[in-house]
Image (cartoon, grey):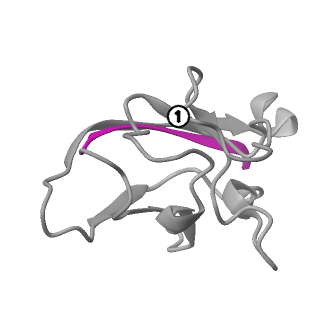
Amino acid sequence: MVDDVDVRVAITKPGDYSLSLILIGPNGQRVPLYDNPQSLPWNGGPIFGNTLIDDEAPAVKGTLPRPPAVKTFRPQSLGRQGGRGLGTFDGSFAQGSWRLAVRNLGITATAYLHRWSLTIEARSEDADQ
């Protein structure tokens, strides 16, 4: 059973204003990771060079002048009304196919997905078996 899920992603695109990232679990559950470019915590620039998306990342307060040196942030769905972020997968089974849906809504710049990965931690009682 899943206890924690983190996503690392590397995408090249000049600016990330028109990207949408959604993690889809083996059971079909969908968690928006980045789906509202208008609420960036910083004033533009590419943010997905080697970015960790983690529910436990520190909250960004205010607007930063540029992408931070440590590229870790919470999924945008975390904290929305009813939104549990990656915690949506807690208690579910990790076996099966996980998918990352990447949509480039921009018409002037090409986006390239270089790599992505998941880190899945199992519940401690499951690890003992």
> Farthest bottom residue?
81
Q: Quadrant of residue 104?
A: bottom left
Badge 1 marks a residue whose secondary structure is loop
- Work out whether residue 124 or residue 48 is closer to the camera in this orientation and state it: 48
Q: Quadrant of residue 5?
A: top right
The answer to whether residue 28 is above or below residue 15 is: below
> Where's residue 75, x and y in %?
63, 54
> Farthest front residue?
65
Residue ID for mark 1 = 66
Q: Residue at x 87, y 37 (%)?
A: 125
**How many numbered markers are drawn?**
1
> Where's residue 52, x and y in %?
55, 34
Res. 119 visible in picture: no
The answer to whether residue 82 is above or below residue 38 is: below
> Where's residue 81, x and y in %?
81, 79
- Work out whether residue 101 or residue 58 is closer to the camera in this orientation and state it: 58
The answer to whether residue 92 is above or below residue 62 is: below
Q: Is residue 37 magenta?
A: no
Q: Which residues are magenta?
A: 1-13
At label 1, counting other C-alpha atoms closer than 10 Å, the crowd grade (few under 14, some 14-19, many 20 or more) is few
Q: Residue at x 58, y 28 (%)?
A: 68
The answer to whether residue 5 is above or below residue 110 is: above
Q: Residue at x 52, y 46 (%)?
A: 43
> Where's residue 120, x and y in %?
61, 38
Tag 1: residue type? Arg
* Left or right: where 57 falls relative to 75: right
Res. 102 visible in picture: yes
Q: Residue at x 26, y 71 (%)?
A: 105
- Work out whether residue 94 or residue 57 is closer to the camera in this orientation and state it: 57
- Magenta-drawn stretch, dominant element (helix, strand or loop): strand
